[in-house]
Image (cartoon, helix red, strand yellow):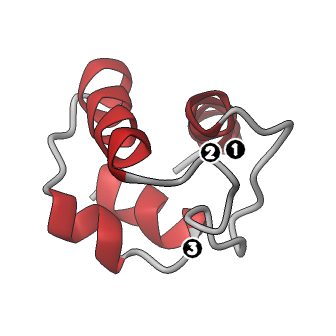
Amino acid sequence: MDDSRQEEFLAALADVLEVPSVATNEDFRDTPLWGSLSCFAVKVMAAQRFGRTLSVKEISESETAGALMEKVFS
């Protein structure tokens, strides 16, 4: 995956989570607004922007933004 796709994904994830930025090694679920609606928003973002349908289980099992990104681009 090229750097521009990685940056695009991390920026989209940060937008969904309403935080300034997200690092690949960061637990994206450890944000003030994380909950079932945020999980759904991540699911929708992955499908609409990157064409990947994720299950709630795939999202919840991802411990970092990088792990989630790997699932989106796999």
Q: Give how far across and how far down residue 65 sits, in percent.
A: 57, 63
Reply above or below: 53 against 47: below
Res. 36 mark? none
> Given contact means CB atoms under 8 Å apart, are the residues at marks 2 and 1 in contact?
yes
Mark 1: amino acid: Asp
* 10 Å crowding of disc 3: few (<14), some (14-19), many (20+): many
Q: Residue at x 71, y 71 (%)?
A: 26
**Real-space Cα distance between discs 1 and 3?**
17 Å
Is residue 40 or residue 25 the one in the foreground? 40
Q: Which residue is mark 3?
A: 64
- For marks 3 and 2, give the one nearer the viewer: 3
Identify the residue at image location x=47%, y=72%.
67
Callout 1 environment at 10 Å: few (<14), some (14 to 19), or many (20+)? few
Residue bearing the label numbered 1 = 3
Residue under numbered circle 2:
6
Q: What's under tag 3, amino acid-wise?
A: Thr
Q: Nearer the viewer, mark 1 or mark 3?
A: 3
Comparing marks 2 and 1, which lies closer to the viewer? 2
